[in-house]
Amino acid sequence: MTTTPVAGRATSVAARATDLSKIYGQGETQVVALDRVTVEFRQAEFTAIMGPSGSGKSTLMHCVAGLDTFSSGSVRIGDTELGSLKDKQLTKLRRDKIGFIFQAFNLLPTLTALENITLPMDIAGRKPDKEWLDSVIQMVGLRDRLSHRPAQLSGGQQQRVAVARALASKPDIIFGDEPTGNLDSRSGAEVLGFLRNSVRELGQTVVMVTHDPVAAAYADRVVFLADGRIVDEMYKPTAENVLDFMKQFDAKGRTS
Ligand SMILES: Nc1ncnc2c1ncn2[C@@H]1O[C@H](COP(=O)(O)OP(=O)(O)OP(=O)(O)O)[C@@H](O)[C@H]1O
Ligand SMILES: [Mg+2]
């Protein structure tokens, strides 16, 4: 099931974790959330991260995205080692290179949809690339809702604002932690479609945590975590294959 990356694509790694470990607490209460994880996220690839609750998915994503510290190992975003950065530099890297989409949309209620989309760039004092912003707004289908505030938007529309916000600054990589977890299946499918399009048409790199085999099937590749380790990966996933794998895995987990 595992395939080796195509030769010559070695330079197009958007993010990489090497021997990454994250240990919470000490002694009896110690939890090994990540156990020497090595994983690569290539440019213009859509990766889903799956695994049982508590397997370390959010921890992995937060460590790779520079939102959390790690106990050992290393993380690179592009050519930058996160471990070598001071706090300020890390904040800047997160702001300039990384887009986030969380399960709770994290929109500011007093700002309009458009203001929410451009907020990270406004904070950074950067002017949005008008053409790009326009194509992002077009893609997520929010043109006639730009002056609405979050409370005036449906859940799916709010999540589309969050997707547009993540895409607007052309980040090197977008991380989503169950970005469609709060949406009905139709709105979820829309958001996943936009993410996939952003990878196919705009060359965006996306890493998404999900529990849903249907959502995972939008990705180019699924990485499976269990007990803080990567146990397998699958290319060109279908919902059926992912579900089969999860069933097998559950069965193995119970017998071992
Ligand atoms: N702040 C913390 N202190 C102690 N243990 C923690 C902390 N945060 C997470 N953990 C533990 O680390 C492990 C991995 O947690 P993580 O949130 O990464 O799981 P997950 O795969 O995202 O699960 P879920 O699917 O439920 O979101 C879990 O066993 C969790 O209890
Ligand atoms: Mg989680």
Image: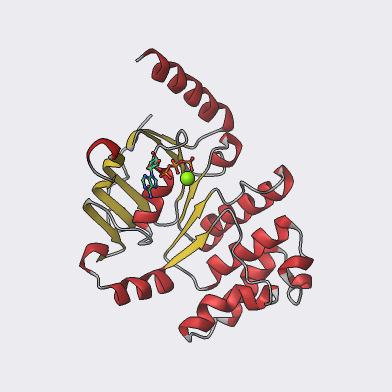
Task: Establish if 190 lies above or below 167.
Answer: above
Q: Percent from the top left, x then y, of residue 217?
A: 56, 38
Quadrant placement of the N terminus: top left
Residue occupying image coordinates x 48% and y 60%: 204
Which residue sits at x=48%, y=85%? 126
Q: Nearer the viewer, residue 24 or 180?
A: 24
Please state if 81 lies on the left or on the right of 45 as rendered. Answer: left
For the residue pair 84 and 201, the one nearer the viewer reads as: 84
How many numbered badges does the structure rendering display? 0
The furthest residue to the top? 255
Based on the displayed image, in which of its 4 quarters is residue 56 positioned?
top left
Residue at image x 25%, y 48%? 20
Horizontal and vertical percent position of residue 96? 41, 74
Q: Quarter-wise, where is residue 133 in the image?
A: bottom right
Q: Position of residue 156 (x, y in %)?
A: 71, 55
* Quadrant of the image containing the C terminus: top left
Quarter of the image holding residue 112?
Answer: bottom right
Left or right? Give the position of 188 relative to 251. Answer: right
Asked whether residue 13 appears in the rendered view, the answer is: no
Q: Position of residue 135 (x, y in %)?
A: 63, 71
Seen at 47% across and 25% down, the residue is 245
Is residue 65 visible from the viewing direction of this image?
yes
Task: Judge by depth and name the residue closer to the eye, 242 or 235.
Answer: 242
User: Which sits in the foreground, 77 or 149?
Assistant: 149
Colouring convention used in this rendered image of the protein: secondary structure
* Residue 158, above or below 254: below
Q: Is residue 148 left or right of residue 24?
A: right
Q: Is residue 229 above or below residue 81?
A: above
